[in-house]
Image: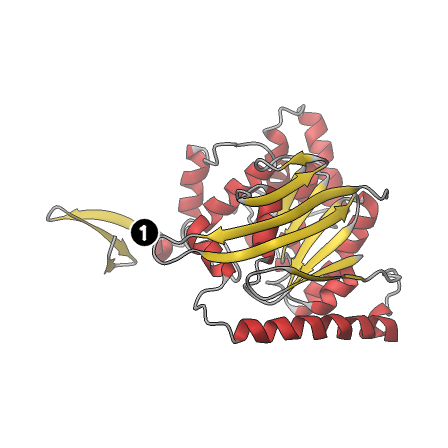
């Protein structure tokens, strides 16, 4: 690792402008530097703009004020140099593990033998050997997230952006996945930016933790968290527990501010409602359109589809993959266009 910054965020501010109501300042004058091959966690209370900052770095949101540089170049949009892993797996339900991992490689015009060997290598790396022909419905939550990580790594991004990837997992699986992620990072040495609400997770995984304030999000402090992560009992050591307590005291103060805030909608909720139609954010549910948005984001991160549009066959398959009661349909009754969802009439 050299001392030169791989990612530079300088005086970045970002507003959300919902269709109704006034604009809300989500981030204010955020500055942060991440070195090459460094593992940095973004930690802060709900709604502080952690995910917003991640999506700005990924190029999924426009930079309004300030600048973001990756390898010295301004971020103008998603690119294959930045892979992203979401909390809700974002797998194609009709594709096997192997086909999901191959998805991005197939659209990079890579020779078949090379892409299959590459996909298999990353399936082996994340510990899914023997499950290549399994479908997402046949996998546990941890195995689904391993597949998503393998897919993100397969096209060899220099930076891995992770938005609470273990948030939906049970405590035991989450702990195992944290250890596996560290082992993968040690082997690949990608630059990683990891969003989390969990203080202990941040201390265990990251080399440095950037603590963010309550909305509008700012960098309150950057704390060094380098430990001997290979020590299986490191979480029980006094230095580790002291570091957790130090970070918790910083986060607790901001969490109390967030709870006492007057805004009815957090920055994350506004991000979801405004930029992703209310479908991509903390605690996202499997509603119509979610898989479309996530798949488009995955394709953009691989530099595969600048237009952000899914192919017709993919879009149709995603729709058919949803449970029947979740598939909305529109009918024209008496000249008025209405929307039905599972037999119930709702406004368009």
Q: Which residue is pictured at 71% across the width and 35% down the height?
A: 72
Q: Which residue is pictured at 67% across the width and 23% down the height?
A: 111
Would residue 97 appear left or right of 316 to someone viewing this image?
right
Residue picked out by circle 1? 328
Would residue 83 appear left or right of 280 to someone viewing this image?
right
- Where residue 18 sits, quadrant-wise, is bottom left
- Front residue of 66/61: it is 66
**Crowding near the residue tagged with mark 1, few <14, some 14–19, many ≥20 C-alpha atoms within 10 Å:** some
SS at badge 1: loop
Would residue 205 appear left or right of 106 to someone viewing this image?
right
Q: Position of residue 274 (x, y in %)?
A: 42, 52
Quadrant location of the N terminus in the rendered image = top right
Q: Position of residue 279 (x, y in %)?
A: 45, 54
Please determine whether, in this image, residue 51 is positioned above or below residue 261.
above
Q: Position of residue 61 (x, y in %)?
A: 53, 44
- Residue 322 visible? The answer is no
Q: Which residue is pictured at 42% across the width and 49% down the height?
A: 289
- Front residue of 113/50: it is 50
Please determine whether, in this image, residue 205 is positioned above or below residue 93.
below
- Residue 99 visible? The answer is yes
Would residue 138 appear left or right of 183 to someone viewing this image?
left
Please determine whether, in this image, residue 254 is positioned above or below residue 98.
below
Q: Position of residue 40 (x, y in %)?
A: 74, 54
């Amino acid at each position: 690792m050299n001392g030169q910054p791989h990612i530079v965020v300088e005086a970045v501010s970002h507003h959300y402008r919902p269709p109704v109501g006034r604009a809300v300042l989500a981030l204010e004058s955020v500055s942060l530097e991440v070195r090459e091959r460094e593992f940095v966690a973004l930690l802060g209370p709900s709604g502080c703009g952690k995910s917003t900052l991640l999506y700005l770095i990924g190029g999924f949101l426009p930079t309004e004020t300030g600048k973001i540089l990756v390898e010295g170049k301004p971020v103008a949009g998603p690119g294959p140099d930045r892979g992203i892993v979401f909390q809700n797996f974002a797998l194609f339900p009709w594709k096997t593990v192997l086909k999901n991992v191959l998805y991005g490689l197939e659209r990079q015009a890579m020779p078949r033998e090379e892409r299959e060997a590459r996909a298999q290598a990353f399936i082996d790396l994340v510990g899914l050997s023997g499950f290549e022909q399994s479908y997402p419905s046949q996998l546990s939550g941890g195995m689904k997230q391993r597949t998503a990580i393998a897919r993100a790594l397969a096209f060899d991004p220099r930076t891995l952006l992770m938005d609470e990837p273990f948030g939906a997992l049970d405590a035991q699986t989450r702990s195992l996945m944290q250890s596996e992620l560290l082992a993968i990072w040690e082997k690949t040495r990608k630059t990683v930016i990891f969003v989390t609400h969990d203080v202990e997770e941040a201390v265990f995984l990251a080399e440095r933790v950037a603590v963010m304030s309550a909305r509008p999000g700012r960098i309150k402090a950057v704390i060094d968290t380098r430990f001997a992560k290979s020590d299986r009992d490191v979480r029980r050591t006094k230095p580790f527990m002291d570091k957790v307590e130090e970070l918790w005291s910083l986060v607790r103060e901001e969490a109390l501010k967030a709870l006492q805030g007057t805004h009815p909608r957090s920055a994350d909720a506004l991000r979801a409602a405004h930029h992703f139609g209310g479908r991509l954010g903390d605690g996202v549910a499997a509603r119509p359109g979610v898989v479309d948005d996530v798949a488009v984001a995955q394709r953009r991160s691989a530099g595969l589809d600048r237009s952000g549009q899914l192919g017709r066959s993919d879009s149709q398959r995603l729709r058919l993959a949803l449970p029947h009661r979740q598939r909305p349909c529109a009918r024209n009754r008496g000249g008025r266009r209405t929307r039905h969802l599972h037999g119930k009439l709702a406004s368009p």
